[in-house]
Amino acid sequence: MPIITGEFTVAMQPEAMSAVAADSGIGRMSLDKHYHGALQAEGKGEMLAYMDRALGSGVYVAVERVTGAVEGRSGSFLLHHTGVMTRGAPSLSVAVVPDSGTGELAGLRGTLNIRIDGGKHYYDFDYTL
């Protein structure tokens, strides 16, 4: 599996919760990402999150549609995110949704690792086509 690395920017905006979930303490955010490097793409998605700041434990789940090019191959695909914080210890999984690739990215599989260093966001994308 090739691994490609690059930088990305992300903007998150709070969104309203449904009437059913409004009193749950869960937050909802829209995601707007721009990937640079061997992954030249935009990511648009939705995130649900909950955090108990006193205990340092929480969770987030997100679905993101990535549209652009992977090493020059054009198309789109979906990523699913699952992040868990257990008393300050983080765990994160970001993977390509099976069979979500389109165009030249049909059949794409893989995982994406997110790193934050000095306030900048980086990705390591381990994939196969």
Image (cartoon, grey):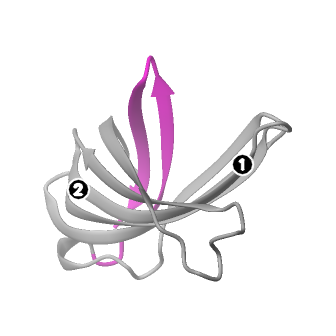
Percent of width and height locating residue 40: 19, 49
* Residue type (three-letter) at the residue carrying disc 1: Met
The structure residue drawn at horizontal position 44% and vertical position 17%, both measured from the top left corner, is 118
* Residue type (three-letter) at the residue carrying disc 2: Glu
Percent of width and height locating residue 79: 44, 65
Quarter of the image where one finds residue 81: bottom right
Question: Can you say which quadrant of the picture contains the C terminus?
Answer: bottom left
Q: Residues within 10 Å of mark 2 (few under 14, many from 20)?
A: many
**Badges 2 and 1: C-beta atoms under 8 Å apart?**
no
Whether 21 is among the magenta residues is no
Q: Which residues are magenta?
A: 106-129
Whether residue 45 sits left or right of residue 102 in the image: it is right
Q: Is residue 68 above or below residue 103?
A: above
Q: Does residue 85 appear in the picture of this structure?
A: no
Per the image, the residue denoted by label 1 is 51
Whether residue 10 sits left or right of residue 69 in the image: it is right
Q: Is residue 32 above or below residue 118?
A: below
Mark in front: 2 vs 1: 1
Percent of width and height locating residue 87: 84, 37
